[in-house]
Image (cartoon, grey):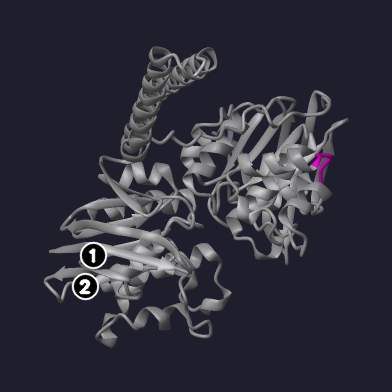
Amino acid sequence: MNIQLSNISKSYSDMEVLKNINFTINDNERIGLIGKNGSGKSTLLKIITGLVKPDVGTVNISPPETTIGFVPQSPEFNPEISVEEFLSEMLSENWEGYKIDLALQALVITDVKNIKLKNLSSGQKTKVYLARLILNDPEVLLLDEPTNHLDTNSLEWFEKYIKKYQGAVMIISHDRKFLDNSVNSILALESGNLKDYGGNYSFYRQQSQNERDAQLRKYEVQQKTHNRLREQVRIMKTQSRQLEVKTSGKDHYVRKKAAKAAKSAKSIEKRLERELEKNAIEKPESDFQLKALFKPIKESSKTVVHLKSVSKNFNSQPILSNVSLTIQKGDRLAILGSNGSGKSTLLKIILDELKPTDGLVGLGNNVITGYLSQGHNELDSKDQMLDELLKNTHLNKTDAYKLLVRFLIPVEKINQSVNSLSSGEKAKLLLAEIMASGANFIILDEPTNHLDISSREALEHAIINYEGTLLVVSHDRYFIENININRRFLLAEGKLRQV
């Protein structure tokens, strides 16, 4: 089995997102497709499935009857049918219903079998679609950000499933740990062009950094050469003008020398133009780093948060049970746990957005909190992105603009309304607001959701240098490992314990 893409190009509104793409998916390959949000990754998968037609180029699937399983980034369902009805569409015989139970059991979601699709969480919907793939058992898997909304246990199960899968797999993902554990080659899509790297994400990261460093060295050598040639031209032109001034117009020798200097200068200028036109080396893009931007405006008390015997019930259902926790100034905590374990509830109790059913919650003196919610519900505005940042911070317009650019917000988006932004862009705006707030206690609930890899790495650089107190909830294992967490807690069955 193989799928061959030849000379694929695709444009939207005069913007070419794919430029002469060529590659082959072979049997048993594990490919990670990476690139910035909006770079054309989803378009490429849809072209392979036939959902989108390329402007130019062909897709050849051999043999033609090869079955392809596709999980889109935002799966579409009939919301009124149950999970069992949705999965039954994959069964050829009624007696095969036991396969549904096995698929749901593998994903640890047997309790959703009779629930309507419209009542599922985002993570449950992703798992149900994966269960559908298990039932279909296709020869090729094309997965568009399947790790979104999956908790750590589900991610680890999915990694094992991909490794054992008997077929080819191509995955779009921003989860770097997942890519490290699941793929053996990386395709990087940038500016419409595709580059192949053998190895997992960490191998790609090192190779691409080596390439960037080598390009920067070549660029600097070329710039020195160009500057030397420009200086030669300047000197020759100066000499030519000085000779012309000195001659009376009758001194043939001086005029001839001036003409020769001018001609040499012109020759070097043409050589420089040809070099710039044919062999110019582009300067590598700056690797934006948000170092030292999280600066608390004042110090908090030694104890930042104290929880004693906190419990929380919803409709008589216990979510948190007898949770005690003390957070001291300078702590960097991560709270881990499966979806629905109560992590976001705990954060909201700390923030006084929810009241505990029992127990005590205390916040220290001079604590200034910056909070990023998982759903970004605090952003609902018709204001332009730049105006929203100015309204909620003490920044001037120039500094606000620079901060958004450093957060990898496209310049053309900065003056668009907040309501028109993608989830990833809203997350960046909220993080920028937190940065500029001077908070000395930052609480981040799944901060890397919807962020591409470049943005995740930029955020990591900023958080590493943050001098205040940090509390993070995240399923992004790579992120957690890279931000200098010093205390980790697991929330399970309502109990919180240090791990």
Query: Callout 1: few (<14), some (14-19), or many (20+) C-alpha neighbours within 10 Å?
Result: many
Residue at x 32% of width, y 74% of height: 53
Majority secondary structure in the magenta region: loop
Q: Is 353 displayed left or right of 270 in the figure?
A: right
Q: Is residue 270 above or below residue 320?
A: above
Q: Is residue 9 magenta?
A: no
**Closest to the observer, 191 or 208:** 191
Q: Quadrant of the C terminus?
A: top right
The label number, if any, that marks residue 140 in the structure image:
1
**Closest to the observer, 315 or 140:** 140
Q: Does the image show residue 13?
A: yes
Question: Marks 2 and 1: CB-CB under 8 Å?
Answer: yes
The secondary element bearing badge 2 is classed as loop
**Closest to the observer, 285 or 319:** 285
Quadrant of residue 44 within the rendered picture: bottom left
Q: Quadrant of the N terminus?
A: bottom left
Q: Is 19 displayed left or right of 467 in the figure?
A: left
Residue at x 68% of width, y 39% of height: 402
The residues colored magenta run 392-396
Residue 346 is situated, as x and y percent measured from the top left of the image, at 70, 48
The label number, if any, that marks residue 343 in the structure image:
none
